[in-house]
Amino acid sequence: MIISALPYVNNVPHLGNLIGSLLSTDYNQTISFFFLLLILNLRYCRLRNYNTLCICGTDEYGTATETKALEEKCTPREICDKYYDLLTKIYKWFQLEFDFLGRTSTQKQTEIVQDIFWKLHKRNLIFNQSVEQLYSDTCEQ
């Protein structure tokens, strides 16, 4: 099984997103480097006829998605749909053939995450914590 970090769906991905050569931070270069390794490993395994399952998806939650939706004057769902479709086309153009390309916003994903959460909660492995964050009185966000 080959898996990858989930890309966000708030912008148009480019080659730098795939291989890290255009990104400046160490974290993004590390993630993109591992994505490149995923691609190379996947192609190698398939050329060798290994029984290979490659899974990826899109991260459709977060501030970046909400901000992009406000910028484009649409809903977060519309942003997710738009960029998921675009990402799928780009992966196809790069001949990245995932066996499954999921989305964090699906009902099944929500059920799985909630199930895991409640199992952890029952074992007292979930903790409450207060965190200070920025808030705009003007935007009420």
Image (spheres, rainbow, N blue to C red):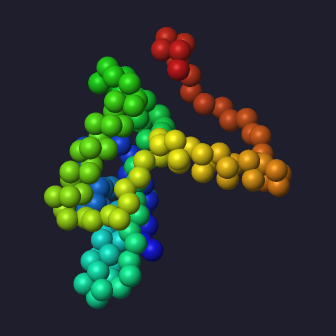
Along the viewing direction, whichever of 20 and 55 lies nearer the viewer: 55
Residue 139, how many percent across, how many down?
Answer: 48, 14
Name of the residue lying farthest toward the left: 93
In this view, which residue lies farthest toward the bottom? 48
State which quadrant residue 29 falls in: bottom left
Which percent across, then down, holds residue 94? 19, 62
Residue farthest to the top, as pictured? 138
Q: Quadrant of residue 38?
A: bottom left
> Could you tell whether 87 is left or right of 30 in the image?
left
43, 65: nearer the viewer: 43
Q: Residue visible at 29% across and 56% down?
A: 17
For the point 42% across and 47% down, the residue is: 103
**Left or right: where does residue 124 sit relative to residue 105?**
right
Vertical placement of 19 versus 104: above or below? below
Instruction: Left or right? Give the position of 118 relative to 50.
Output: right
Residue 135: x percent and y percent?
56, 22
Residue 114 in sight here: yes
For the point 35% across and 85% down, the residue is 50
Up the image or down, 133 lies above or below 12; here it is above
Between 72 and 132, the residue placed more toward the observer is: 72
Query: Dividing the image into 4 quarters, which one contains the N terminus?
Result: bottom left
Number of numbered discs: 0
Residue 14 visible in the displayed image: no
> Residue at position x 65%, y 45% from top?
114
Left/right placement of residue 64 relative to residue 93 reads right
State whether residue 136 is above or below residue 122.
above
Residue 68 position within the rendered picture, expressed as x and y whole percent measured from the top left = 35, 30
